[in-house]
Amino acid sequence: MDRIRVGDIEMAYEEHGAGGRPFVLVHGFTGSRDDWREMLPRLAARGRTLAMDLRGHGDTTNTGVASTYDFAQMARDVLGFLDALGIERCDLLGHSMGGVVAQLLTLDHPARVASLVLMD
């Protein structure tokens, strides 16, 4: 697990595999990067794969302030995550609540997302 500063939080994430454009995984409500554990080896065999913990989930900062938890903020967090890692464009998968976050990021910054997968 690695950590990276994104705005007012520190995001926990894992990076597996190697290659050009990364595949970024966004978990659902009450989930974490561990939701992808069984799939990570197969995804990483195909290329660079990143799984992060959204704010208040897993090992990422919990601000304890309810007003800092909305979909728009989480989309900004994912964008900040991409910026912090120097990722200009990615393939993006959002599961459940993560799908809402991924959709918002894609709608606000379409040039940053090469493909979008909405799961469940």
Image (tube, rainbow, N blue to C red):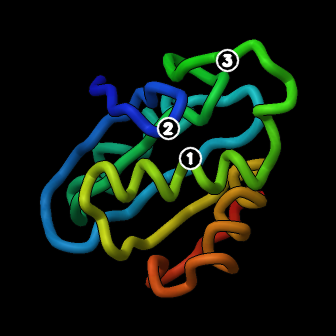
Q: Tag 2: Cα neighbours inside 10 Å, few (<14), some, or many (≥20)? A: few
- Distance of mark 2 from mark 3, alpha carbons? 12 Å
The amino acid at mark 1 is Asp
| Position of residue 66 measured from the top left corner of the image (x, y, whole percent) | 86, 24
- Distance of mark 3 from mark 1, alpha carbons? 13 Å
Occupied quadrant, residue 102: bottom right
The amino acid at mark 3 is Thr
Q: Which mark is residue 44?
A: none
Question: Is mark 3 in CB contact (under 8 Å) with mark 1?
Answer: no
Give whichever of 13, 87 is nearer the camera: 87
| Position of residue 32 measured from the top left corner of the image (x, y, whole percent) | 58, 29
The quadrant of the picture occupied by the N terminus is top left
Question: Is mark 1 in CB contact (under 8 Å) with mark 2?
Answer: yes
SS class, disc 1: helix
Q: Which mark is residue 77?
A: 1
Which one is earlier in the sequence, the residue at label 3 or at label 1? 3
| Position of residue 109 measured from the top left corner of the image (x, y, whole percent) | 57, 78
Residue annotated with mark 2: 7
